[in-house]
Image (spheres, rainbow, N blue to C red):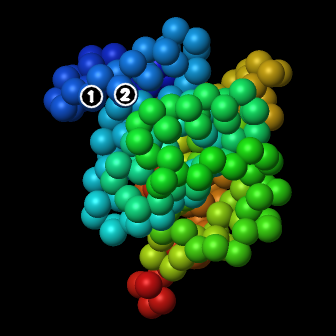
């Protein structure tokens, strides 16, 4: 897997040494993703979300950004159903193949298309929404994520620290400028939104966990 952890190499290595090894199928999927420079969710983040899913009683999940299906497969092993959206047709094909090989095609629905377009036409309600797509688009997804998330549900945003760049001052290379600006805006919005309670954790490449609902209406 592509390792963009914002924690030190020593801390990251130690945390991963404490995790139970993945089965052969997931190890093979990780290896293929690493060889092809396809980013997949990092092990310590997977473990965190397993705890969240079990603790919060998560039954159905909406994922934005499927890639090869690695995270959807991990989620589906812990909940009842996953809907995952991917715009790259080749990734959709590969994800469906991997999901079928994992024996989870009855629990995971892969949607090929634009995430915002799909969400705007979706009237379902989700226990958890996981965003792992184009980082500069997170702020655009937020209103629909809030609409689709049930009260008491969890919004998880991956890679929000962008290799630590959101905290750095000074010159930002032009190719990263818009992404970092949008991510900073997104982090501000989810941290100050009255409907959300948010914690931002410096594991993996930064994970934000937001719960929808106040103590009064949860």
Left or right: where 156 falls relative to 183: left
Instruction: Name which quarter of the figure residue 58 lies in.
Output: bottom left
* Residue 167, visible in the rendered structure: no
* Residue 123, visible in the rendered structure: yes
Q: Image height check: is 143 above or below 31? A: below
Q: Nearer the viewer, residue 160 or 81?
A: 81
Q: To which residue does mark 1 refer?
A: 23
Quadrant in which the C terminus is drawn: bottom left
What's the distance in space between the residues labelled 2 and 1, CA to CA? 6 Å
Left or right: where 90 falls relative to 32: right
Left or right: where 2 falls relative to 109: left
Residue at the (19%, 23%) spot, across then down: 17
- Residue 200 % position (x, y): 46, 49
Q: Nearer the viewer, residue 74 or 213?
A: 74
Residue at the (77%, 58%) spot, across then down: 118
* Marks 2,1: beta carbons within 8 A: yes
Q: To which residue does mark 2 refer?
A: 26
């Amino acid at each position: 897997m592509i390792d963009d952890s914002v924690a030190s190499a020593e801390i990251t290595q130690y945390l991963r040494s404490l995790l139970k090894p993945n089965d052969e199928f997931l190890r093979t999927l990780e290896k293929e993703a690493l060889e092809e420079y396809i980013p997949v969710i990092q092990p310590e983040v997977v473990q965190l979300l397993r705890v969240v899913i079990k603790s919060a009683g998560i039954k159905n999940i909406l994922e934005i950004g499927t890639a090869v299906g690695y995270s959807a497969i991990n989620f589906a092993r812990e909940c009842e159903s996953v809907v995952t959206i991917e715009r790259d047709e080749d990734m959709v094909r590969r994800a469906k193949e991997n999901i079928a090989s994992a024996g989870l095609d009855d629990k995971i629905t892969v949607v090929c298309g634009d995430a915002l377009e799909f969400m705007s036409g979706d009237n379902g309600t989700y226990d958890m929404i996981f965003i792992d797509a184009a980082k500069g688009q997170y702020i655009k997804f937020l209103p629909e994520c809030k609409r689709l998330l049930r009260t008491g549900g969890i919004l998880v945003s991956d890679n929000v620290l962008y290799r630590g760049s959101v905290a750095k001052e000074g010159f930002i290379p032009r190719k990263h400028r818009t992404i970092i600006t949008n991510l900073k805006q997104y982090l501000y919005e989810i941290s100050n939104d009255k409907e959300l309670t948010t914690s931002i954790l410096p594991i993996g490449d930064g994970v934000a966990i937001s719960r929808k609902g106040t103590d009064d209406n949860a």
